[in-house]
Image (tube, rainbow, N blue to C red):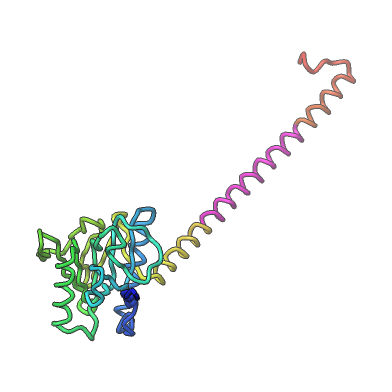
Amino acid sequence: MSIDIAPAVVYPESDGLPMADNTIQWDWMVKIVGELRELLAGQRVFVTGNLFWYPVEGETTVVTAPDVMVAFDRPSGDRGSYKQWEEDDIAPQVVFEILSPSNTDDDLDTRFAFFEAHGVEEYYFIDPYENTVLGYRRRGRRLVQVHRMQGFVSPRLGVKFERLDGELILTGPDGRRFQTREDRVAEIVAEWKRTEALFAAEQARSDQLARHVEDEKKRADEAAKRADAYATKLRALGIDPDEQ
């Protein structure tokens, strides 16, 4: 008697396509993922980009890979894909998509329908060439467009969207703009150099003050020695200096 064992379901972790079509799309993806990870550090949240998301167990063709996705109440850490049934059935609450030259209207519509059908609460579609963003928020079963994105703040992330001087700006709750990793490193290095310069200036002032205190101490010691010498001379003449 033989027992048939169903083969294990294989959930692919790659489709063989590049993560981004060009450096513009890539920079936006890395910028948003990096800044969100820094912003949400210490919280129980999983932030990643271009990772396959399988919302239904056993359905290997029901899958997409958002450019950026954020799943609150899920631990950070490495994953080959986001299998929702292994994540307490928690769908990513926030997703970002960055327009690329290869996107077609049908592709964008399909991805939007996927996000709408599988529980995404906030969806932001960024056009990095026009520096614009479309935002959508869940209303029941629908993702409804946010009609005014200028100054809009994500309820989940606390991130503000603005278009200033033709540039799309994302700002965290701390007031700091989202940056590429290179710009962020350059900012930190510049701040470090400013701090080093301030420390050197303070150290120089401290050293100068210390020298001044030392000089004053030397002058006081010399004055004390002269006073002792005069007192000795007075005593030699039979005069008590303490009575003068």
Picture residue at 14% right of the left edge, 82% below the top:
105
Residue range of the region highlighted in magenta in the rendering: 198-223
Q: Position of residue 9 (x, y in %)?
A: 31, 74
Residue 17, image x, y percentages:
32, 84
In this orientation, which residue lies closer to the viewer: 211 or 93? 93
How many numbered discs? 0
Q: Is residue 50 something one can see in this rendering? A: no
When asked about the image quadrant of residue 68, the answer is bottom left
Based on the picture, tell me whether residue 74 belongs to the magenta stretch: no
Q: Residue at x 36, y 58 (%)?
A: 75
Of residues 5 and 201, the one drawn nearer to the viewer in this rendering: 5
Query: Nearest the camera: 244 or 164?
Result: 164
Q: Quadrant of residue 1?
A: bottom left
Res 127 quadrant in image = bottom left
Q: Is residue 198 left or right of residue 244?
A: left
Q: Where is 1 relative to 242, above or below?
A: below
Q: Is 156 located above or below residue 24 in the figure?
A: above
Residue nearer the viewer, 213 or 26: 26
Q: Position of residue 95 (x, y in %)?
A: 24, 67
| Residue 206, visible in the rendered structure | yes
Side of 144 relative to 170 (left or right): left
In the current view of this chain or complex, which residue is farthest to the front? 1
Residue at point 28%, 73% (across, down): 67
Image x and y of residue 83, in percent: 30, 67
Say whether residue 220 is magenta.
Answer: yes
Q: Is residue 216 above or below residue 100?
A: above
